[in-house]
Each structure stands twice: as C-alpha cells, then as structure tokens.
Image: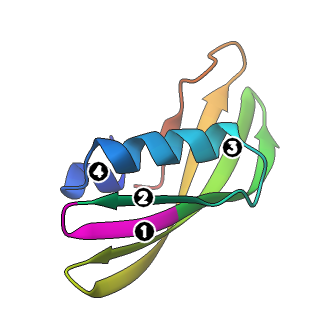
Amino acid sequence: RDPLWSRGLGDVYKRQVQAALESDYGTVYNWYEHTAKGSVKAVHGYPISSGYCRVIYSMITVKGKSRHFEETACQSSGTQNKWRWVGI
C-alpha cells in the first residue's frame, strides 16, 4: 500500500520520497504542488534479514495546516528501487 500519496498527494511528493529513499541520510527534499507543500528526508536506516529499511520524516502543509509524518520503507536484497512500506 502506498503511504501519504494514497491520501491525495501527487507525483511531486512521490518523486521526493523516492529521492529521499535513495539519498544520504539528512538530505532534505522540498516540494510544492497546488495547495500543498512540504519536505521529506531519510533520517536513519537499519538492516533486516533480507535487506534494509529506511525511516522517512515528512512535514506536509495543506491549505495552511501542517502535519509531521514518520514512515518506514524496506527493500529486500536484489530488488533495487523497490520499496515496501511497513506499518501503514
């Protein structure tokens, strides 16, 4: 299941999350789309038996109301760029 963009956020947010998953920890990606804006970054990761996981922090503002989200995505060894969201 997709995380936040399944709740109405679009392609710009999706691309920034994907960039954060593939970049160095702490690199901030800002985005703007219609009445929404925000930032996203990977803050840490940890190994699992079949690969590794990354924790993503997002701050999203829609029509002047802001929320912070923490989401985790995991990738199995050998499945480059294929992330599975956990706990959503």
**Pointers 3 and 2 in contact (C-beta within 8 Å):** no
Compared to residue 80, the image places residue 53 above or below, namely: below
Which sits earlier in the primary sequence, circle 4 or circle 3? 4
Write down the quadrant of residue 28 in the picture: bottom right
- Specify the amino acid type for callout 1: Gly
Q: Which residue is mark 1?
A: 38
- Tell me the chief SS of the magenta region: strand
Q: Which residues are magenta?
A: 34-39
Which sits earlier in the primary sequence, circle 4 or circle 1? 4
SS category of the residue bearing label 2: strand
- Specify the amino acid type for callout 2: Trp
SS category of the residue bearing label 4: helix
3D distance between C-alphas at marks 3 and 2: 23 Å
SS category of the residue bearing label 3: strand
x, y (%) of residue 76? Answer: 66, 24
3D distance between C-alphas at marks 4 and 1: 13 Å
Q: Which residue is mark 4?
A: 5
Q: Residue furthest top?
A: 78
Q: Does 70 lie within the magenta span?
A: no
Describe residue 48's horizontal placement relative to residue 82 as left or right.
right
> In which quadrant of the rendered image does the N terminus lie?
top left
* Residue found 61% across the figure and 38% down from its top: 74
Mark 4 crowd level (few <14, some 14–19, many ≥20, 10 Å Cα):
few
SS category of the residue bearing label 1: strand
x, y (%) of residue 36? Answer: 27, 68
* Residue found 38% across the figure and 51% down from its top: 13
Closer to viewer: mark 1 or mark 3: 1
